Amino acid sequence: MRNSENPSLFSEQSSGTLRLIGYLAIAAALMAVDHRSDALAGIQRRIAGLAAPAYWLAMAPVRMGRGARDAVAERAGLVRENAELRQQLLLAQAGLSQIDSMGEENNRLRALLEARNRLSLHAQLAGLLEVDLDPYRHRLLIDQGSDQGVRGGQAVMDAHGLIGQVLEPLANRAEVIMITDPGHAIPVRVARNGLRAIAYGTGEVDRLELPHIPFSADIVVGDQLLTSGLGGHFPGGIPVAEIRDVRGDDSATFAIAEATPLAGLTRGNQVLLLSFLQVPEAPAEPESATIIDAAPASKDPTAPVSSEAGQ
Amino acid sequence: MSRLREGGWLFWISLLLGLVLTVVAIPEAWRPYRPFWLGLLVIWWTLEAPERIGLGTAFALGLSQDVLIGTLLGEHAFRLVAIAFILLRFRARLRFFPMWQQALAVLAILLNDRVLTLAIRSIAGDIAIDWQFWMAPIIGALLWPWMFLMLDDLRRRNRPREV
């Protein structure tokens, strides 16, 4: 081995620079193509299937940890947890029945208005794959993909608020871009008065930024931000964040607000995938047990949103 | 041919483990400190067995990490090829450095890699970094001696069986 070292060293040096330039050029070309077009996405999607074993191995410690916790957890603790969950379920059911009645009322109002373009909101449950993607890009991986009907652009939320949207569904997985990703922006409105703004991700899990707000605008600390439904990417009325600071920006011509996302972005187990379904004239039949028919929301910003219609 | 077999399983197992460690879930607060595992492994293998790993292998490894964590296709390939090249250039000197100097050299290489990353991502689009962005190379350099000794030991145990 020592003997083979010298010749290999010299040959590396003579041809190394050329090969380096060659490889770097290929890598740069790949990045440029990947950045500018979707041509490589299909290929990447196919190869990504091979990554499944790596994800499976990476999740092993999490699975073991959970198994160990379940095995060790005391009976009393489980009983207490059970009771708490029961109580939460009851509360949630009470809330749901209220929403049902509001939904019915909303439908009646809509019928009166003869709204044609009705959209109904469907939710699909997805598990989070416990793997870390790049820490400087706020992405998540979920265990539902295009085979399960996931499409790019679907809104992703948890029990507390909006998490983000599906970026690119693979066969059995999908990548989700979180609202805190520095490359993400979402149209929002203030729940209290309907003031519209755009919330930008900052790259920090607990901070969104709303720049370019006129000083005259009525926005104060503690205001809740909801999706506005403008742009049609997200259904309207999903809680997004809470304002925690409003100050002047560097130019001193606009105010800039900071908000804390409401969703548990750091780590949960399950998320909801929302999708619009165009509802035909006749009411659609419920498709499966996992589909929740929530209050219909509309892309049309002038149409009443369920919460307002209920008041 | 025996040259290729030398350290065969260790080579593949270490790289697979490197890929798994790259995505294994760790608490949110530690995420920025995760060392560039494949970078460390490419450094080690280039240092100890350059006949096993070259610019081509580094490129392929980088591509697999890009696919695995969904970064711009080619980003990690670019970075790993750069690391492998620097290592091949200074290999003769680095091999006989004492451990602490080697760790410092690894730190320099990883910091250079961070600068490259920053450059690539600034060109590609938005990136918000903070001081933690520069911590991963330090963790990597601190881990280097342990990784070096462990892989060295595993390789030595492995060798007599294969000769």
Image (cartoon, coloured by chain):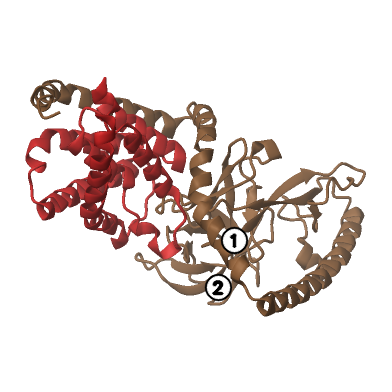
Chain colours: A brown, B red
Residue designated by label 1 = A67
Mark 2 vs mark 1, CA separation in Å = 46 Å
What secondary structure is found at the residue carrying circle 1?
helix
In this view, B67 is above or below A159: above
Q: Looking at the rendering, which quadrant does residue A11 occupy?
A: top left
Q: Chain of mark 2?
A: A
Left or right: B97 in relation to B86: left
Within 10 angstroms of label 1, few (less than 14), some, or many (20 or more) residues?
few
Q: Position of residue B57 (x, y in %)?
A: 30, 29
Within 10 angstroms of label 2, few (less than 14), some, or many (20 or more) residues?
many
Which image quarter holds the N terminus of chain A?
top left
Left or right: A227 in relation to A295: left
Q: Which mark is residue A143?
A: none
Residue designated by label 2 = A219
Q: Residue at x 53, y 62 (%)?
A: A65
Mark toward the start of the polypeptide (2 vs 1): 1
Q: Position of residue A79 (x, y in %)?
A: 72, 77
Q: Position of residue A132 (x, y in %)?
A: 46, 52
A106, A25: nearer the viewer = A25
B151, B75: nearer the viewer = B151
In this view, B95 is above or below A201: above
Amino acid type, callout 1? Gly
Amino acid type, callout 2? Ile
Do marks 2 and 1 share a chain? yes
Q: Position of residue A305 (x, y in %)?
A: 76, 61
Task: State whether residue B101 appears in this view.
Answer: yes
In this view, A256 is above or below A43: below
Q: Residue at x 47, y 28 (%)?
A: A40
Q: Chain of mark 1?
A: A
Task: State whether residue A28 appears in this view.
Answer: no
Front: mark 2 or 1: 1
Which image quarter holds the C terminus of chain A?
bottom right
